[in-house]
């Protein structure tokens, strides 16, 4: 072996080691396969849901599975958006989304703004609007650090507090 080819052999071996390490999850695939199976069962629950509340709960379960292992925050936000459309007055969905996407503040911010724009701010949806405004304020006071927006959201929250509470 010539002296100039030793670095080439070392670089090739390092490249193959990194390549094998990167495709290891695909080759082994046990954890991802279990997550995909759980996601399939959650989608089956969505399809078999009898009412909108049950469909929204199944969509939230699917979003919680997706965010970490399979699809990422964009896919999880889309599932939460579908859940919010299925049950627009549910504050629990907004709280679950805020808890799940807390490590992805930009995805959560976009989801919450879409929630606020999706329906009128009336008494029927006041609880979910309050939850969305609280989560947005926490985002702007925390990871997104925008004091002006945080104050504006707090003022909007005070305005929504004057709405009568619905029965839900």
Image (cartoon, grey):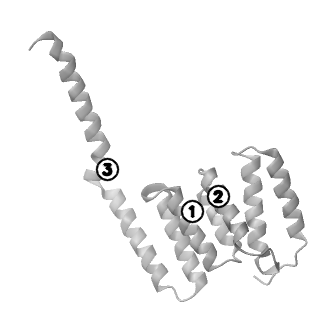
Residue situated in front as seen by the camera: 92 or 164: 164
Residue 79 location (% of width, % of height): 54, 68
Toward the left, the furthest residue is 1
Secondary element at image label 3: helix
Q: What's the CA distance linking mark 3 and mark 1?
A: 25 Å
Residue hosting label 2: 110
Q: Is residue 167 above or below residue 84?
A: below
Residue linked to disc 3: 25
Point out the image quarter for the C terminus.
Answer: bottom right
Instruction: Locate residue 30: give its quadrant.
Output: bottom left
Q: Residues within 10 Å of mark 3 (few under 14, many from 20)?
A: few
Question: Sequence-wise, which precedes: disc 3 or disc 1?
Answer: 3
Question: Residue 141 location, x and y as percent?
Answer: 77, 47
Q: Is residue 120 left or right of residue 25?
A: right
Q: Quadrant of residue 85?
A: bottom right
Which residue: 49% across, 69% down? 62
| Label 1 neighbour load within 10 Å: few <14, some 14-19, many 20+ | many
> Residue 11: x and y, percent?
24, 24
Name of the residue lying farthest toward the bottom: 50
From the viewer's perspective, tell me whether residue 113 is left or right of residue 47.
right
Quadrant of the image for the N terminus?
A: top left
Report if the CB atoms under discs 2 and 1 are less than 8 Å apart. Answer: yes
Distance (Cα) linking label 2 and label 3:
31 Å
Cα–Cα gap, marks 2 and 1: 9 Å
Vertically, is 79 above or below 110? Answer: below
Q: Residues within 10 Å of mark 2 (few under 14, many from 20)?
A: few
Camera-near label (2 vs 1) is 2
| Image point (88%, 58%), residue name | 155
Residue found at x 77% / y 73%:
127
Residue hosting label 1: 77
């Amino acid at each position: 072996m010539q002296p100039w080819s030793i670095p080439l052999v070392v670089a090739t071996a390092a490249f193959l080691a990194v390549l094998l390490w990167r495709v290891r999850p695909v080759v082994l695939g046990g954890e991802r396969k279990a997550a995909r199976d759980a996601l399939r069962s959650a989608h089956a629950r969505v399809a078999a849901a009898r009412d909108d509340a049950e469909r929204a709960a199944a969509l939230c379960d699917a979003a919680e599975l997706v965010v970490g292992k399979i699809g990422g925050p964009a896919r999880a936000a889309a599932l939460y958006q579908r859940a919010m459309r299925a049950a627009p007055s549910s504050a629990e969905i907004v709280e679950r989304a805020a808890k799940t996407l807390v490590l992805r503040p930009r995805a959560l911010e976009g989801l919450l703004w879409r929630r606020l724009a999706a329906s009128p701010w009336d008494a029927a949806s006041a609880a979910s609007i309050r939850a969305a405004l609280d989560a947005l304020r926490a985002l702007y006071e925390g990871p997104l650090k925008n004091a002006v927006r945080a104050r504006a959201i707090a003022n909007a929250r005070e305005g929504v507090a004057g709405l009568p509470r619905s029965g839900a």
